[in-house]
Image (cartoon, coloured by chain):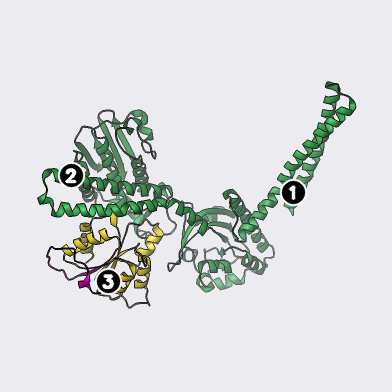
Chain colours: A green, B yellow
Amino acid sequence: MDNFKKFSNDLSAYGFFWILINSLLTVGAFLLFHEVLKLSEEISLVCSTTLAILLSIGVAKLVVMAVSEPFRAVWQAIWLMSNQDVPTPQPDKLTHGRELAKAMIQQIYKLGDAPATPQAPVSTSAQPVTAIASVSTSNTDLLELMPLPVLALDANDQVVLANQMLLQYLGRAREDVIGKSINDVLQLSFQSKDTLESWLANAKVSSVTSGSSWDRVRMQLPDDKGLKQFDLIAHYTKNNASNYETLLAIFDHTERYSSEDNSTSYVALAVHELRTPLTVLRGYIEVFEDELDSQLTPELRDFMHKMSASAQTLTAFVSNILNVARVDENQLTLSLHEANWNELLPEIAKDLELRAKVRGKTLELEIQPNLPTVAVDKVSIYEVVSNLVDNAIKYGGESTKIAIKAGVGKEGTIETTVQDFGVGIPASTMKFLYTKFYRNHRNKGSVSGSGLGLYLVKAIITAHGGSVWVNSKENEGSSFGFSLVPYANMAAELKDPNNANIERQAHGWIKNHSMYRR
Amino acid sequence: MNPSDSDQHSTTPVTANGLKVLCIEDEFFISELYDRALRKAGYNVTNALNGNDGLELAKTDQYDIILLDLMVPGMTGIEILKILRAPNQTKELHSKIIITTNLVQDDAAREAIESHADGYIIKADITPKELVAFLEKLK
């Protein structure tokens, strides 16, 4: 009722000011016309009244807008929650509706709290049956009536209530859900480190009551029943009398979010269409190199190598496009495993040799022996080295040498550098190097490129927990480096039985659950 | 159809390694290349250019390895995989199923597919020879 009182007070204040301002303006205008402009009394009266009427209409409109806005928001919230198709949903309104629903859930809490029977002790028991028994019925009914999938957890994060909507949403029976741990019921992936788990852990320590919401939460249903995407809101109250410590509500947006994903997946389509002919090209070229090599003249062999290298470069570029799209959508997931850098780096370099060779460059490796093993995602780290070497080939100028060095850095990390002896980079442009689509103007005309490579290198290395750097002198060449964390440093994290292999995402984003494999 | 009906691309005589491969792949060029490389390595190869033929052949369970493209006409690779790996629909296959694709998939979808297969290959990332090397490791 407090809100309503406030609302009517506001309304009277609006009305009061409206009349006051209008009267003052009318009198003022009358005085202006009569005294200053020396018009007759009648004309002044007519003019000032007309002005006042026009003003009233304008002000009235403003007041009505201000007054009706909350109603509009409520109406929108109801519409949203009724799960009907909202015509052209505007994101801000949706958020607004969600915020209102959050307030509503809070209200349900309070309702649940109010008639809390004094004989029902605050149960933190792990026994779901007794837990349910202590739940006040009005609360349960209300949650059951909510036109959204709703879930309540007790102090041990076990599900004590799941409404019919939720069971339908998950396609599971009530007994499969009640009494289970939240992690067994919902396998959620969040966009950032701000996960339900971390929020809840924090709320339990530091708050009596707390609320939060997340956008674009993903959940893979078991048995290939598909992927759900939704917004999630949560509310936490410590020692809540109804035994619902945490309430979760789901706003399903699977269709909307997946259609948005599809609009970006034209990248995926383009990549597929490019990859098929590339597969064929590389396949036939391999046949030539393998079987017809002896029949080729040196010139033809040279041409063959150039074709092969170009097909490889194009394949690498296609992967770059795809990975940049993934980084931008936070879909790039790394799976880190132990690897021997003394073996892996030469392996990668060997693969890149041909590309360098056809451009008249040789890769010279200098790797400190017995480096500590590193924690890497092999596919992604290959792309890092490949991008740096491709750059060194492109910007190497007249020099024929590209130096790849690896060793242990000052802080115990494994540092790898790829150095060319070409044109170098002007100091003024260094800070833009890792920006997407950035290309040094001086080179734009003479060297082809997309400006995606270093952006990707940085994203991948950051996700590995390492860092990137560059040293360059104009006309002497550039050296691009990156560091990798020794496996031993990550081993503790990796040996955690819940993290059979660590996965990381660009921007340092991490999934909520550890049941993941690549 | 039995393996001997399949088109013979390779002319090079090789020592057979006794392993039978079914290659379900609609892109004829890729099919030709894989067939050629696998035969050279001593595999006995059968090709299916669409999903329905592929499924019928796969169900006979005479293959040691099935290369399954996800985007084949008739029936998609995912559908085929589901049928072949369904616990009740067919007797359990002894064939190893390797997914070959150029499709970009989000991790969740890929994960779901991988859990039912024995390998997952992005075709553009490997040459036919590298495919053979991959299958050798599988043994």
Quadrant including the C terminus of chain A: bottom left
Q: Which residue is mark 1?
A: A7
Which region is colored magenta?
B1-24
Across and down, in percent, residue B25 comes to 29, 63
Return the disc, 1 or 2, that comes first in the chain's sequence: 1
Q: Which residue is mark 3?
A: B95
Spatial separation of the CA atoms under disc 3 and disc 1: 71 Å
The residue type indicated by label 2 comes to: Phe
The residue type indicated by label 1 comes to: Phe
- Could you say which is closer to the camera, residue A461 or residue A169? A169
Question: In front: mark 1 or mark 2?
Answer: 2
Helix, strand or loop: magenta stretch: loop
Q: Is residue A362 above or below residue A44?
A: below
Q: Secondary structure at mark 3?
A: loop
- Could you say which is closer to the camera, residue A283 or residue A476? A283
Question: In front: mark 3 or mark 1?
Answer: 3
The image quarter in which residue A416 lies: top left
Question: In front: mark 3 or mark 2?
Answer: 2
User: Badge 1, how many Cα within 10 Å: few under 14, some, many 20+?
Assistant: some
Q: Which residue is mark 2?
A: A303
Spatial separation of the CA atoms under disc 1 and disc 2: 80 Å
